[in-house]
Image (cartoon, grey):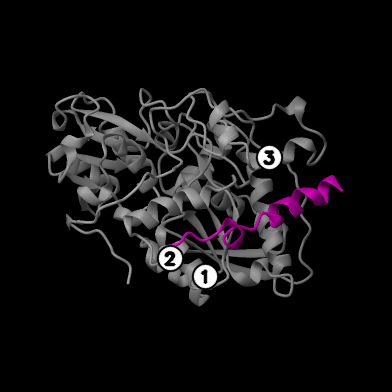
Amino acid sequence: MRRRAGDKWIGLVVVGSVALSSGCVFGGDGNDDAASGEPSTSEHQLRVPSDGDLDDGCGEASATDAADLAADRTIARCESGAPEAVPLARPATLRVGISAPTEDLAPVLLAAHFDEFAEENLTVELVELPDPEALYAALGTGEVDVVAGDLDAPFFDLVHDGAGVRLALGGAIARRANDVTSPQPGLWLRNDQLTEPERFSDLENAHFAIADGIADAVAASVTAVIRQDDLSLNEVRIDLASGAEAAEMLHDGRVSGAWLDEPAWRSVQDNARFRLVATLPASESIGGIVFSRRLVDHEGDRAVGLAFTRAVVRTVNTYLADDYQQDDEVVAALAEETGLSVEDVQATPPWLFDWELRAATTERLQSTFVQLGAVIYEEEIPERDIVDRTLYRDAVAQVQG
């Protein structure tokens, strides 16, 4: 049974170092990191190809080297409207599980809103399951066919159980990752909890609010910061809270730190009592889109999985290629789909969306989960048993060919 972190101290000892991807505040210029297989932590910005750099359809800019982890790398893009829809011969319906309709899931939300799924002869039904265990359990039982969201520990447990699910598409990347001077989602601390600015050992036994505790995908980013002072999440007390509740707990002094997602971090951004110490990773997403076995199996319904992939990739290229907040139609659609106001959508930095998957992301996340005891196994699962890059490669190759 998975060890879950509740409102209690988890007294495990973590042995060894953790090689992680994170939005930490240390690192070099990115070149050595990329060469060594570790993600860059430079403060350079990810780049998006300009229209002039794009070929008709999906050309050279539509595929990048998965091993490139530089924080100033160029993200894959096709021209707007590509790849062109190839409607299925027979209509199909997919149920897509999500925790909530949030802006970081914009490629799925807008593909439905702008009828990009319908162009592929697909009907997509969104199923909201806030708890990650329930969400991935539903994928394992076939209640949903796809999960879009963070790669929390229950995803890896499902892979370990032999369900045959595969991570097939990437997700959202923070536009200002590593820049802790720019308010954004991340780990926010009360300044009065540290005797010195970087003395994280002061936080031993302190309370942290994290939505899913040590099983949360953000555990990697949090651990990468506090480990600088030989502290791990197994040496603090974790309260399972997120959003407005986590922000309120931080304001009230009930926790020393909290991981605040959008838009909860806005409630602390101008308050001198708090500071941002960790962000999401600089060059890769800790989320993505996971397919059931049948959608990646050539003897199953892979054509349906490919149609879903085309619609998502086309949505990114058409509506979310770069700063989508400059497009009133897109902002209005996001407000409608997320239930936020237009002003709230525009009050936070726009995400960058990457349909590709970086090399070894799943191994870096697992390294944290295994050492914290967040998963039910002890030996990391190799990437080849978790990731399937063929669907998005085939989607753009159809145009290239």
Q: What's under tag 1, amino acid-wise?
A: Val
Residue 153: image location, x then y, percent: 41, 59
Position above or below: 266 against 355: above
For label 1, the crowd category at 10 Å Cα-Cα, with few meaning under 14, some 14 to 19 and many 20 or more, is many
Which callout, 2 or 3, points to the residue nearer the camera?
A: 3
User: Where does label 3 land, which residue?
Assistant: 65
Magenta span contains residue 386: yes
Taking the spot 59% from the left edge, 44% from the top edge, the residue there is: 358
Residue lying furthest right: 401
Q: Looking at the picture, tell me which residue is in the foreground, 122 or 254.
A: 254
User: Where does label 2 land, which residue?
Assistant: 135
Q: Earlier in the sequence, mark 2 or mark 1?
A: 2
Residue lying furthest front: 16
Q: Looking at the picture, tell me which residue is in the foreground, 217 or 54.
A: 217
Relative horizontal placement of residue 84, taking residue 17 as reference (left or right): right
Q: What's under tag 2, amino acid-wise?
A: Leu
Helix or strand or loop: what does disc 3 sit on?
loop
User: Where does label 1 land, which residue?
Assistant: 144
The alpha-carbon separation of the residues under discs 1 and 3 comes to 31 Å
